[in-house]
Image: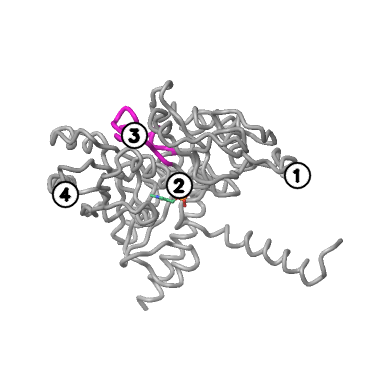
Amino acid sequence: MKLHAAEQQQLEQLYLSIQNTTQNFLGYPVSKDFDYSELMPFLQYPLNNLGDPFSESTYRVDSRAMEREVVNFFAGLFRAHTDDIWGYVTNGGSEGNLYGLYVARELYSKGMVYFSEATHYSIQKNVTLLNVDYVIVKSLPNGEMDYEDLKDAVGYHRHRPAIIVANIGTTMTEAKDDTKKIKGILENMAIEKHYIHADAALAGGFAPFVTPRPAFDFEDGIDSISISGHKFIGSPMPSGVVIVKKDNRDRIARRIAYIGSSDATITGSRNGHTPLFLWYAIKKLGVDGFKKRTEHSLAVASYTEKKLKELGIKAWRNPNALTIVFPALSETIINKWQLATEKGQSHIICMPNVSYEQINEFIADVELEMCTSAI
Ligand SMILES: *Cc1c(COP(=O)(O)O)cnc(C)c1O
């Protein structure tokens, strides 16, 4: 069976439009510099990583062995204790956030969740889904959590376990909350029952490679972490990784005879291709590749900030951030370069695929507009 001519044309149109919109794309944190062509033959098979990647399953058209390697790789980068980790490849950072909060709530059903006002919208949705009480803490002007406000809020509810969501790269300004500081606050206040989840959707892919290393991982006090796979690493389908402490996840796993595995994940059927893509990226890049991508992105970010400032635009960025924030430019430029804009502020995120040439083109557009509007 063939597609009708009109449908064939529709497909071609879509292809061209995707090709075109990918060209000018500076505002969202998605890498596009990948080549997974070697994996194309796998698209002919119904891979499904049903159930727990760390236990056997009777459904074996899967990539669970690779999935375990992906989890272990990131667990290593995030300095988790090798004998107390568990995790899986998710559909994205949001699912990992839901999972981390789910584990926290199962641990502390009377817990109060705290997160800052700069937090990604998935957290608000997740606390609603989980039906847990929460407090929104103030953010500092750079987007980082206001630790004094956190202290006050926790003090006010000090009889309840505290579940903190730390942002490791906020959506608008890529601010990183210091989990060591947060842990210190909780210990100083003698809040024994506490849990810290790191939303590292954006910055988890490169935070281990910047100097000074931000405080964000298991050594720095966290209990779980979620990252996106399609952001810093890049993949054709959304993906992510969540890592929790094994002891904690054991409380929520249930053994299901039908799949011959335990049910410890949010969804039942799970993508078997995305773990394969992430595995492939990790093997191809290696730790050195990750470091190089990080260095390149930081250099382009610093260049972009400098160029914008040279035009008299009040651009700034957080320490070692790939995100440059500046007052919103014209509609034409926002649309052309797909710049995320909120409350009068826009940003550019220098993901690894962003090149100096693209930045130069963008800067030329901005400059041209400034000249024409000045006439
Ligand atoms: C992108 C992002 C998310 C959501 O991740 P998805 O992979 O899109 O589900 C959550 N938090 C932050 C800070 C993000 O940047």
Please say if 23 is above or below 319.
Answer: below
Q: Quadrant for residue 366, please give it.
A: bottom left
Residue 92 position in % (x across, y down): 49, 47
Q: Distance between the residues labelled 1 and 4?
A: 53 Å
Q: Nearer the viewer, residue 309 or 119?
A: 119
Q: Which residue is under mark 3?
A: 223
Marks 1, 4: nearer the viewer? 4
Mark nearer the N terminus (1 vs 2): 1
Q: Which dot marks residue 44?
A: 1
The magenta stretch spans which residues?
205-226
Quadrant assignment for the N terminus: bottom right
Q: Residue at x 64, y 34 (%)?
A: 63
Q: Are marks 1 and 3 in contact (CB under 8 Å)?
A: no
Query: Does any portion of residue 1 appear in the rendered image?
Result: yes
Q: What residue type is labelled 2?
A: Gly
Q: Residue at x 56, y 32 (%)?
A: 53
- For ligand 1, tell me if the residue under mark 3 lies within 8 Å: no
> What residue does disc 4 label?
153
- The residue that mark 2 highlights is 93
Q: Give how far across and how far down residue 144 sits, in percent.
A: 25, 48
Q: Is residue 187 left or right of residue 46?
A: left
Query: Pointer 3: residues within 10 angstroms few (<14), some, or many (20+)?
Result: many
Type of amino acid at the residue the image marks with label 1: Gln
Q: On the rendered structure, is 226 left or right of 58?
A: left
Ligand 1: does it lie within 8 Å of the C-beta at label 2? yes
